[in-house]
Image: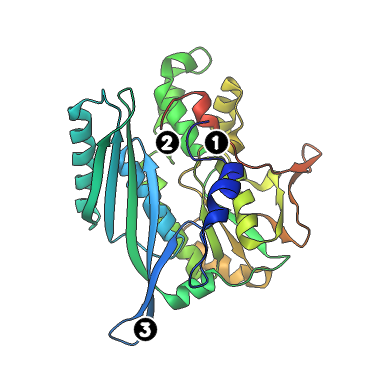
Amino acid sequence: MRGTVGNRILERSIVKHISGEDGFRPGPGLDYSVLEKYTDDKGMERLRVAAQGHSSQGRIAIIRAGNNLAMAGARIREIMITMTAGEDCPERNIRKEMLSVTEYAAENGIRIIGGDTVFCGEGSSLNINVTAFSEVSEEINIKLRRKPGAGDLVVVSGYTGLYGASLIFSKNEEDLGKRFPKSYIKKEAYNTGFTEKDLDVTYGAEAMIRGGAAFLHDVTFGGIYRTFYELSLAANLGVLINHDSLPIRQSTIEVCDFYNINPYLLLGTGALVAIVKKEELKVFEEEMKRASVDFAVAGTLTKEAKREIYSEKFDIRRSLNMYEEDEIFKLFKEI
């Protein structure tokens, strides 16, 4: 197994041993943590929040941490950076990533407040973990964690597996040349969903929150299917997803078909899901339109403790399984 730990291990060996404090218990589908509650100088109740992100690239690690904070309605203020390098990792690689991180932080008004760098294990790999901090009003957090109900809608913004597909196109040009024209490969490698701007879901999350969405969860390792599974866990309800409604580019389907991997279990950084009450859909639609953020209604929450996906087009109905490993690791050792 590589990448983010699977749901099975996460639930039975990690989360179950953590006691919740102040009514906020960490768990699958909850992307941020509440550190403390306080009253500011204007008498407003506020929360100090934190989230993490990881990657072999420092800037992507910051974006993932920022995406997780965005699920709380917050933007990054400070970060701590931990670099874990194999004993053969060249110093120039560490320096390159640190320079890249400091540039990104300066560009986005983020303060670096500390971290750690260690050599551990064999090889020349470099893994970067970012812990991000910010603040948000308690009022927003209460709205985001309101009790969901059966019949609430599950909405999706962004394309299924697009980031993973873009990485495959960019890293496997020679191999893919056996089937696709070079111009097509190059176009898809640098298409929407590959740039740092498109990977950051902060703007879309803020639009969703203004539109009344709750239980936001960004898509990352394990793809859109894992995200639905964890959203169901966080809501403590079942979920029924219409496979035919999921946004996906034809190029993603084609490259996944070439490598015989499942695009719906593929790295999907840049997309996010949320819950919207059916009676509030019109208001949500208007806010998303005003923000120029596309979305699709993917399904509904259900009373039954089932997590299912169906397709009228393909006449199938099956269970959503626990996430074990992202499809991207069938092709690459690290991302």
> x%, y% of residue 48?
36, 69
Give the alpha-carbon distance from disc 1 to disc 2, as whole Å. 17 Å
Res. 294 visible in picture = no
Secondary structure type for disc 2: loop
User: Is residue 151 placed above or below 188 in the rendered structure?
Assistant: below
Q: Quadrant of residue 215?
A: bottom right
Q: Label 2 near label 3: C-beta < 8 Å?
A: no
Circle number at residue 266: 1
Mark 1: secondary structure? loop
- Disc 1, disc 2: CB below 8 Å? no
Q: Name the side, left or right, on which 61 lies relative to 32.
A: left
Q: What amino acid type is highlighted by mark number 2? A: Asn
Label 1 or label 3, whichever lies nearer to me, is 3
Q: Secondary structure at mark 3?
A: loop
* Among the two numbered marks 1 and 2 on one chain, the one whose residue lies closer to the N terminus: 2
Look at 42% across and 14% down and name the residue there.
174
* Residue to which mark 3 is pinned: 44
Q: At which x and y percent is residue 246?
A: 63, 46
Q: Residues within 10 Å of mark 1 (few under 14, many from 20)?
A: many
In the image, what residue type sits under mark 3? Answer: Met
